[in-house]
Structure formats: C-alpha cells, structure tokens
Image: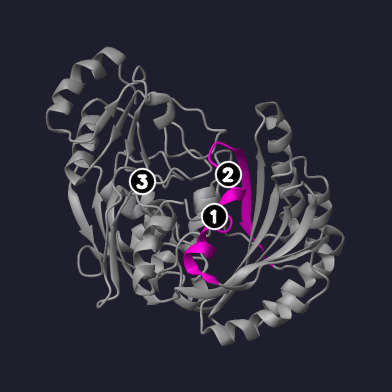
Amino acid sequence: MNTSASSLADAVPEFAKTFTGQLIWPTDPTYEDVRRIHNGLVDKRPALIARCRGVADIVDAVSHARSLSLEVAVRGGGHGVAGRATVDGGLMIDLSLMKGIHVDPKARIARAQGGATWGEFNRETQLHGLATTGGVVSTTGIGGLTLGGGVGWLLAKCGLAVDNLLAVDIITADGRVQRASPADDADLFWALRGAGANFGVAASLEYRLHPVGPTITGGLVAHPFEQAREVLRFYRAVTASLPDEFTLFAGLIHAPDGAKLAALVMCHCGPLDAGTAAARPIKSFGAPLMDTVGPMSYCDLNAMLDAAYPKGALSHWKSSFLAQLSDDAIDTMIDRFARSPSPMDQMLLEHLHGAATRVGAGDTAFPHRAAGYNFLVVSEWMDPAQTDRGVAWARDTYAAMAPFMASGRYVNYLDHDEAGDAAAAAYGSNYLRLRELKTKYDPSNFFHMNQNIPPMS
C-alpha cells in the first residue's frame, strides 16, 4: 500500500482540523529525533508521524491511513528490536505522548495509556506498594510488552503481564473504539493477550495489581567468566525448585571495562527476611567479583539493567525457548560467548515457573506455559562499521544452540529476519484460532507491521 507525497500533503489539512496531537513531516525540525526508535539499527523514514494525545486522535489516524492506503506502524515505547514500531513511507501512529496512569489502590487496579513505560507505571503504583508484572527494563513500553505476553520480574508470583490484563480499549482496523475484556468481546480479549499488535492500537490497558514492595530483595551477583560452567550448572540446580516469590535469571555478560562475566540476577518479592534467606545460597556460591544483592526498591530493580540497553545502540537479537538446559547447551553457550565481538553483547536465560506456568496454554493467545528457560542472544554495538560482525555472531550463535531448542518462541524477542513462519512458532496450538480471529477483526491485514498473523485466505 503506497500513496504519493502529493496525495498525503493534500489530505493532511483535513486531518489537522481535528487532530489535537502533533503531525510531523520529514521537513519538520523534530522529525529526525521523533522517528528514531530504541534500536539504532532500524533506520526507517515514515512519510508522516501522528503523535496522538487521545483516543480520537488514534481513530483519526487509522481512518486517514485507510483512506490513503498508507501502511501503518504503531509505536508505544519503541523498544521492539525488530523495528515494527516504524515504517518506510507510511504513517507512524505514535502513542508516546499518551502517558496518563490512574491507580485505584483500594480495588488494586491501574489503568494506563498506551504510551507509558514500565518505569512510569511502577512509579505510580509503588506509591501504594502495588505492582504488576512488567518489563525487565524500565524504559520498555507497557503496550508492546503486554500485548506480546509480558515476561518480567514478578512472573512466578503474579503471572505474565497478559495474565494481569483486565481490559483493553483498542482501535480496530475499521476505526471503531472497542473495549475488550472478559465481559466485552471475550474473543478479542483472548487474542490481545499475546497477539495484540495484530488486532489494533491499544489506547489504554487496565491491570490487576498485587502487593509488592516498595522494598524487595534483588540485585546481581557476577563471577569470572572462567567460572561460567559452574555458575550455569548451579543456576540449573537452583531453578529446579524456586518459590513463587523468587525469580532468578542468568546471563553471560560484560563488565563496564569489557571483561566477560557470568551473572545471576534475582528478584524476591516476598517478605525481606524470606528474601534474605532465599538469596543466601546465591550470595555464598563461589567467589563472586560483584554482589549487589540486598534490599532495594522495586523501582530500582526494574531500572537496574537499563544502562545495558541504551537508546540508539545497534541491536540484533535471536531467541527461543530451550527444550533443556543440558551440559552441552551450557558448554555451547560458553564457547559462543567466548567469541563475542562486542563488549555490549549478552546471552540471557530467563526462567519461567510458578504462576506463569499455572495458566492453560489455550487460556490466552500466549501459549508457552511450561516451566523452563527462554534463551536470548543480545548482539549490541555502537559503531555501524561493526554491523556485519554483530549480526553474524548473533545468527551463528543461534544456529549453534539449535540442537537444544524447543519449538516455541517468545514473540517479543523475534527480530526482523526470522526464517520460516516465526508467528506460527510463537503461537503454536493457538495459531489457527488467531488466524480465524484476524479474519474477523482485520480481514485486509491492515495491521501487518508486526510479527504478522495473516487472515484466512
């Protein structure tokens, strides 16, 4: 779908009559800054950026895009590594000005607009000692993370972000404002909980909150890379039996000076004395070079890893769930990380257990409910001259880990270059139902700048 620049220019005055946000052209002095998303490797140039201030602005943007046959991308936080939040020559619907958050502490419910980040969301809910499962990094947008599933620090105690979603106000492909909840269009609500980007623009999201913090037990323990095999085997043993309050991730990372490390990162959201006891084996294992584990605010924990993902860094990711974290898988991880070309590269293991695994695979569109590990290769660099090397390392590492992978994949971590039908792998047994619902709600595939689920032909 394309339209000429002159047709768009002719149409915009009519658009601007009612639009209360900002319409930004490529000639606008703010365009170069506004068009950028988090991943500096993505360099797309929308024909127009519509920075919405409210639901009516989103409706106008969708309606004008349809009338002009413009391709549409939707940006909330803009964190998605694949760059689906922007588009060449089309319309970017930008929600980043829509950051309103309302917390009802008595009902333990928060409603937030689609441009809010998890850091902003947590700042409001933590005033009342409440939280819900959000991003591991605080600068991540609430909408994109939630609509793709939502792995985060509280997953074992509270479930995934989608498991705490109570309702969504969404603008569908035909420009309707639709409330989706268990009582209001349950089919659409089911699809939004894991495949939401395919079904519309989420203007606001309503969440169930849980008593968390404001002080929890968390932090990072880092060991010399030479001890990585022992650290990852220890991690495997510890994660075989964790209480719901305890989330433990592992990674092969770099220190600020570039030295390679093996790290464990934890969040215990229960009472502080229980957190101290749970952390004791993590802190006493081996001879760590760094240990920051202790009482901290939940907001600080959520922001602890932000510096590792600076806006503008060039990134390429590869990810899959593992069938098992075997000794061979650990050895392959270590061998591949030893060849890492950038001091910003990482390999991460996110362990799923507890409440996130006590939801049926078909209860939400997000189907991955077995206890186990999600494996993520983060290739990251700053110098564009290193792009070929960074991309090659991520791809080669992913290929080397293929023998240990399960069939399922986490849609939020899929990059732009996935081979085969990555969406089918992301949704598994729910894929056919999602295609049927896509046919019902978006038969022309208007929303296709995503990990796309095509309508039935």
Residue, x 16% and y 42% (percent of image)?
56
- Whether residue 82 appears in magenta in the rendering, the answer is no
Asked which secondary structure carries label 3, the reply is loop
Range of residues picked out in magenta: 296-323
Q: Nearer the viewer, residue 206 or 186?
A: 206
Query: Neighbour class for label 1 at 10 Å: few (<14), some, many (≥20)?
Result: some
User: Which amino acid does the dot numbered 2 rest on?
Assistant: Gly
Please state the horizontal and vertical placement of residue 41, each as a whole percent of the image: 57, 33
- Marking on residue 425: 1
Name the image quarter holding residue 145.
bottom left
Direction right: furthest residue: 226
Residue marked by disc 3 = 455
Relative to 32, say whether 378 is above or below.
Answer: below
Relative to 339, say whether 351 is above or below.
Answer: below
Residue marked by disc 2 = 420
How many marks do you count on the picture? 3
Please state the horizontal and vertical placement of residue 418, each as a whole percent of the image: 58, 42
Please state the horizontal and vertical placement of residue 202, each as a whole percent of the image: 30, 51
